[in-house]
């Protein structure tokens, strides 16, 4: 009896690491001091000494049951982008610059090529956010996961000068809400998605005219990464007063997280076009509008609160970063929360 007969293939683990390295190379930053394969990752903080009060910000998250679609479609090259996005978007939301990322993959059986494909997506997400992929772990856990399934989670660390932290404390009535478009469902609410649609290869490969693609392509579209868009706004000289990453809980849970007491975010539903995937989901699942806005991003992945005088500069900066932006509402006096009108 040996470890391989028990279900864990150490040699496959070695091969996975070797296959990963070509993808990881493109994420390197000059501050990275170690190579992949060591026991830890080292990252120099030397270049940040010029900050008045350098402050670390962090985020950790997974992809959730969106992974089930990747299993059915046998498509694993973008799911890593979702994992990175869920972590670095939260860091950017606080005004931080992501520095490095680590991933954790737990699987029933280590298929090196599949693991490398997953990590290629992680590397793509890191490249999009200028974060270095400095380490990770692949755990082969036979008997715990089915052979063809896995889980994926990650952890990111960023930095911001304390004075540049986005806290929402200065938000006041009259401030304007700017929404940045999402790429679709992102990585939240898939337990409901899987109740609305049949989770079969046939169903997911069905083409919908209103989507302009198959259902699976629309649902598996990777989560938008907003790091560069928020950096562009900051570099335009705009002070972002508040920032909300619209994840699980949709508008109703996430927007209030950036608000101080005594103000309400008034969002105009007709200020932008809700993407077709959400309309299709609501129709097929007979889901009430309030529940849709309480579960999904509805086409807006990030909401910024800015001074009215900074609206044009904000919109231009977001568009310069290649993203679509909309003025979606304003801040009013009232009980802390969100109203859709």
Image (tube, rainbow, N blue to C red):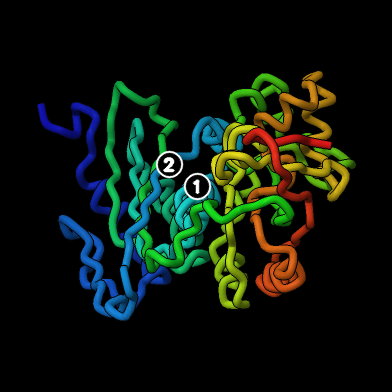
The disc, 2 or 1, on the residue closer to the chain's N-terminal end is: 2
Q: Residues within 10 Å of mark 1 (few under 14, many from 20)?
A: many
Image position of 95 with respect to 297: above or below: below
Rendering coords of residue 100 (x, y %) = 35, 62
Element carrying mark 2: strand
Find residue 146 and report its image quarter. top left
Rendering coords of residue 85 (x, y %) = 51, 52
Which mark, residue 133? Answer: none
Image position of 208 with respect to 164: above or below: above
Q: Residues within 10 Å of mark 2 (few under 14, many from 20)?
A: some
Quadrant of the rendering where the N terminus is positioned: top left
Q: Are marks 2 and 1 in contact (CB under 8 Å)?
A: yes
Element carrying mark 1: helix
Q: Which residue is mark 2?
A: 61
Comparing 4 with 315, the one in front is: 315
Q: Give the left or right position of residue 213, taking residue 249 as reference.
A: right
Give the residue displayed 61% in from the left and 30% down from the top. Answer: 189
Give the residue displayed 23% in from the left and 39% down from the top. Answer: 9
Number of numbered callouts drawn:
2
Comparing 15 with 274, the one in front is: 274
Residue sitting at the far left: 1
Give the residue displayed 26% in from the left and 72% down from the top. Answer: 45
Q: Which residue is mark 1?
A: 86
């Amino acid at each position: 009896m040996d470890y391989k007969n028990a279900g864990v293939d150490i040699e496959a683990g070695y091969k996975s690491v070797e296959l990963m390295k070509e993808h990881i190379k493109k994420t390197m930053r000059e501050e990275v001091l170690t190579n992949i394969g060591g026991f830890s990752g080292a990252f120099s903080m030397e270049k940040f000494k010029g900050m008045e009060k350098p402050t670390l910000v962090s985020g950790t998250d997974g992809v959730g049951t969106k992974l089930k679609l990747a299993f059915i479609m046998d498509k694993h090259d973008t799911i890593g982008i979702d994992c990175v996005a869920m972590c670095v978007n939260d860091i950017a939301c606080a005004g931080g610059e992501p520095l490095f990322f680590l991933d954790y993959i737990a699987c029933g059986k280590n298929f090196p090529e599949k693991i490398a494909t997953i990590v290629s997506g992680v590397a793509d997400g890191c490249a999009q956010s200028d974060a270095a992929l400095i380490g990770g772990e692949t755990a082969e856990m036979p008997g715990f996961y089915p052979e063809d399934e896995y889980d994926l989670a990650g952890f990111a660390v960023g930095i911001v000068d304390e004075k540049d932290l986005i806290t929402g404390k200065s938000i006041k009535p009259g401030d304007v809400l700017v929404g940045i478009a999402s790429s679709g469902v992102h990585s939240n609410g898939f337990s409901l998605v899987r109740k609305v649609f049949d989770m079969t290869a046939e169903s997911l490969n069905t083409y919908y005219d209103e989507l302009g693609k198959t259902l699976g392509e629309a649902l598996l579209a990777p989560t938008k990464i907003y790091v560069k868009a928020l950096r562009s706004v900051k570099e335009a000289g705009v002070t972002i007063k508040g920032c909300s990453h619209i994840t699980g809980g949709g508008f109703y849970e996430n927007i209030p997280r950036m608000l101080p007491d005594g103000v309400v975010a008034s969002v105009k539903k007709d200020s932008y076009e809700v993407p077709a995937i959400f309309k299709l989901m609501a129709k097929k699942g007979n889901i009430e509008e309030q529940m849709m806005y309480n579960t999904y991003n509805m086409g807006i992945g990030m909401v910024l609160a800015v001074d009215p005088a900074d609206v044009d500069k904000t919109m231009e900066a977001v568009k310069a970063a290649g993203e679509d932006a909309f003025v979606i509402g304003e801040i009013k006096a009232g009980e802390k929360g969100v109203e859709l009108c």
